[in-house]
Image (tube, rainbow, N blue to C red):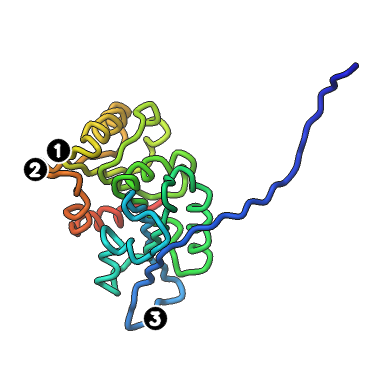
Amino acid sequence: MSQTGHRLVKEITKTVTLNYLLHIPEKEEPLAADQKWPVILFLHGAGERGNDLEMLKAHGVPLIADQDKSFPFIVISPQCPVDEFWGMHREAIMALLEHVLENEAADPKRVYLTGLSMGGYGTWDLPLFNSNTFAALAPVCGGADPSKAEELRNIPIWAFHGAKDDVVYVTESEKIVHALEALNADVKLTIYPEGDHDAWTETYDNPELYKWFLSHSL
């Protein structure tokens, strides 16, 4: 007999590399022993890819954290390499999040995921592979395959998009949100009637977003 059946069982170790910014809130008094900060994991857009972390401070949550040292969340902002996409770095992102949760005063029950444009797509994508990690999602001008709605239905989601976005059409958000609504998921979509691709400035400047984040916990 020339062919016989066999089964391979072998542990494989993988090394991942990802540069990132980390914001730890500055506080006059140290945290009490039982206190932990909520966490925002932020995924930038295509324009901030590279190896210069200063680029990440141009938009979104890293910009806010840079301007407000007391911004009351731990903010993790990884940087995607040039010509790559967030879907290529799922394992590295999750390893980074795990590292911060283990080494900082971070609350694993209050981890919130958000991102803009390419990062908006990443925000829809990452929970498909890590369904019990995030307490809430806020994708900005992104999108997802509506057929994935069932896998996202148990996560609170607030999506944002500009009606006049000619880079990522608003229908990208509408399709997945409508699919989630059909499943009675906890989802809502804010559309800025005069907004273009920059839906992020108004979104991240809105204090209601952070109140909404904090209203959710695993």
- Image vertical order of residue 125 relative to residue 175, above or below: below
Task: Please state the horizontal and vertical placement of residue 218, each as a whole percent of the image.
Answer: 41, 51
Crowd tier of the residue under label 2, counting other residues whose Cα lies within 10 Å: few below 14, some 14–19, many 20 or above: few
Which numbered disc, 1 or 3, marks the residue closer to the eye?
Answer: 1
**Which badge, 2 or 1, is on the more N-terminal residue?**
1
Looking at marks 1 and 3 on the same chain, the residue that comes earlier in the sequence is marked by 3
Q: Which residue is mark 1?
A: 163
Q: Which residue is mark 3?
A: 30
Q: Position of residue 129 (x, y in %)?
A: 49, 40
**Do the CB atoms of the residues marked 2 and 1 lie less than 8 Å apart?**
yes
Within 10 Å of the Cα at label 3, are there few (<14), some (14-19), or many (20+) other Cα atoms?
Answer: few
Give the SS element for disc 1.
loop
Q: CA distance from mark 2 to mark 3?
A: 44 Å
Residue at (34, 72) in percent of width and height? 25
Separation (CA) of disc 1 from disc 3? 44 Å
Q: Would you say 174 lies left or right of 53 here?
A: left
Residue 104 position within the rendered picture, expressed as x and y whole percent measured from the top left = 47, 69
Left or right: 42 in relation to 128? left
- 186 shown above or below 198: above
Dividing the picture into quarters, in which one does residue 191 lie? Answer: top left
Circle 2 sits in a helix, a strand or a loop, which is it? loop
Structural distance between the alpha carbons of marks 2 and 1: 6 Å
Q: Nearer the viewer, residue 177 or 15?
A: 15
Q: Which residue is mark 2?
A: 194
Residue at image x 40%, y 30%? 148
Which image quarter is the N terminus in?
Answer: top right
> Disc 1 vs disc 3: Cβ atoms closer than 8 Å?
no
Residue type for callout 2: Glu
Tell me where residue 161 appears, x and y as whole percent: 20, 42
Residue type highlighted by circle 3 = Pro
Considering every residue shown, the one lying at the far left of the view is 194
Choose the circle earlier in sequence order: 2 or 3.
3
